[in-house]
Amino acid sequence: MAASHGHRATAAGVLARCRELVRPALAEAVGRLHPWAGEMAAYALGWSDATGTPDPGGSEGKGVRAALAVLGAEAVGADGGVAGAVAVELVHTFSLIHDDIMDGDGLRRTRPAVWKAYGTGPAVLAGDALLALAVQSLAEAPGPWTAAAVRHLSGTLNALVSGQAEDLRFEQRPWSGPGAVEPEQYRSMAEHKTGALLGCALGLGAVLGGAPAGTVSVLERAGRHLGVAFQAVDDLLGIWGDTAVTGKPVHGDLRQRKKTYPVLAALVGGGKAAQELAVLLESPGLLDGTAAARAAALVEEAGGRTATREEARRHLDTARRSLREASLTPAAAGDLDTLFTSLLDRSR
Amino acid sequence: MAASHGHRATAAGVLARCRELVRPALAEAVGRLHPWAGEMAAYALGWSDATGTPDPGGSEGKGVRAALAVLGAEAVGADGGVAGAVAVELVHTFSLIHDDIMDGDGLRRTRPAVWKAYGTGPAVLAGDALLALAVQSLAEAPGPWTAAAVRHLSGTLNALVSGQAEDLRFEQRPWSGPGAVEPEQYRSMAEHKTGALLGCALGLGAVLGGAPAGTVSVLERAGRHLGVAFQAVDDLLGIWGDTAVTGKPVHGDLRQRKKTYPVLAALVGGGKAAQELAVLLESPGLLDGTAAARAAALVEEAGGRTATREEARRHLDTARRSLREASLTPAAAGDLDTLFTSLLDRSR
């Protein structure tokens, strides 16, 4: 395949190009914040350390959402890719800051989470500031489709918050028996928590460019499925990821007893391994290293790892098929396909 | 005066009428939230207790912002009062929930704050959900001025967050000497934290109705000044309010060493009382009841109470004068004047 598309950029190249394109507008937007909120935002974005000193080799995110917004606009020949990208990156950063507070996650991209570095109250403030800025930056985008774009974004915010609510509620539910979280319920949560924003990113540029509703909805659907696949890969990395690359502890999600797709799929798989896994997970307290390693082995034995790989593959395939339903500029469609595929094989 | 306006409603009547008008749309909006977020929102709005049981005699707010939004629209003969009112009440509720987390305030309207009743993480989520819903509800308002209205609201959100950031930063600054918070800096914070949303409320209906920019800006300015006056009265109540009515401890703001206008004005007043006050406030730890009572007496002796009353009066007068600059429907202008004046004489 690669030979017939000799001019195709690599996924890393696509991400880098989009990051370059979006960076000035994103920095300008962040510059409008109250200086203290701006400092925390720059830290969260990986642009500076916790003393406010620029940290160019820092812990910047991959910029997947920004790239989707840029490519979605390019794919329909619309302007507005950058405006959409700024909004979704700001929303993404807001959600990471607040989710880390809610989940009690002290580490984010190998560094202390914002609430660990600055305190919980200031982290609440920083998230609020970024969310407000996201809406403001999009509401100020020129053109006749601004209101429609803000409607899309705010609907996405609502879905995002619902997904986070579902995720937090999962914590209180049992591992087995009636009331246990089913893999389908987890997928619905992931569609809200991760899929909604990826779908919004991919569709937003098309909305701002006044593309037909059919095209917008194809792009959004593709993004949502990509999001579910993305979350499944995240879940695999949360258990079997290389800690040197992810910056998270070995079997981290198991130590914290997170209800993720591999575990839930293993538990419904039945059999001896699933039963032993349930007993292990239902024991009180944190899981130590040995117990977490045993749990990881049981998840694998009960088929949870394979099921999650298949879940990711299936949703990626659907996402790629969706893209082909719309009539998109070939270059952008090629870049999107490259990016989509790479997100399945990532190591962080 | 009252005799020549025999048909004029009382302030309580104006608030009740607007609350009635807004309530169904507000309840419908809250009904769109994830059920858990919706339960916390209903608690925060004073509609139910912490078990989710409806509590009609509960701790509903006065609904000042909703009333301003309704009256602002009526004043320019525009529709959209209710849509604006829903958005600003949702924003107000969001900001109370998150501010209580940041300020560590455990009590709100005589009941536990949301973070005390549901936990910090869930309270972060509830605030996020309300903020997203506010934007969504406004973005879905019909008519050609929706994008302009969302721009107004999002600019307000930015100001609100800046005001909260300034307020939090004040905590770290000294009571006296270089770096001490000056009364003017406090006023600027209050203009952001309280004035911006009141100004937005009053102007939003006019924006949605496509009123001329001049009219919108007169309404917004009036609301901003009202907000500064409102905050000054809040500060007086925070020290000298009747605890049976406010539901807050005696001299509460002094016990918590909050940097409020009366205290800052007293400190810059100079003289013996101001000096003794500074020493008292600079002593470590919480102030006990006796020390707080002494501090309150010193604030009064150094002129802080009078200065704050004058501050409130001055900004209320400016707000009322502003209103008279625009050509408004007489009935709504009368209701606004009644409401403005009542906010200065309130006891909670």
Image (cartoon, coloured by chain):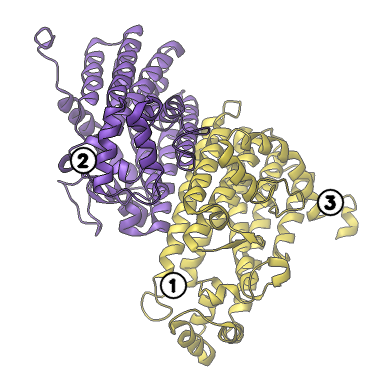
Chain colours: A yellow, B purple
Depicted A194 relative to depicted B80: above or below: below
Please tell me which residue lies in front, A37 or B292: B292
Is residue A67 something one can see in this rendering?
A: yes
Please identify the residue farthest to the bottom as the structure is shown.
A272
- To which chain does the residue with label 2 belong? B
Is residue B66 something one can see in this rendering?
A: no
Q: Amino acid at mark 3?
A: Ala
Q: Of the residues tagged 2 and 1, which is closer to the observer?
A: 2
Instruction: Give the secondary structure at mark 3.
Output: loop
- Report the residue at 87% width, 59% height from top: A2
Q: Amino acid at mark 1?
A: Val
Q: Is residue A64 left or right of residue B156?
A: right
Instruction: Give the secondary structure at mark 2.
Output: helix
- To which chain does the residue with label 1 belong? A
Q: CA distance from mark 2 to mark 3?
A: 64 Å
- Name the residue that disc number 1 marks: A181
Residue A9, label in figure: 3
Looking at the rendered image, the quarter that the C terminus of chain A falls into is bottom right
Depicted B101 relative to depicted A102: above or below: above
Please tell me which residue lies in front, A331 or A253: A253
- Report the residue at 79% width, 54% height from top: A12
Q: CA distance from mark 2 to mark 1?
A: 44 Å
Residue B98: percent from the left, percent from the top? 40, 46
Depicted B7 relative to depicted A239: above or below: above
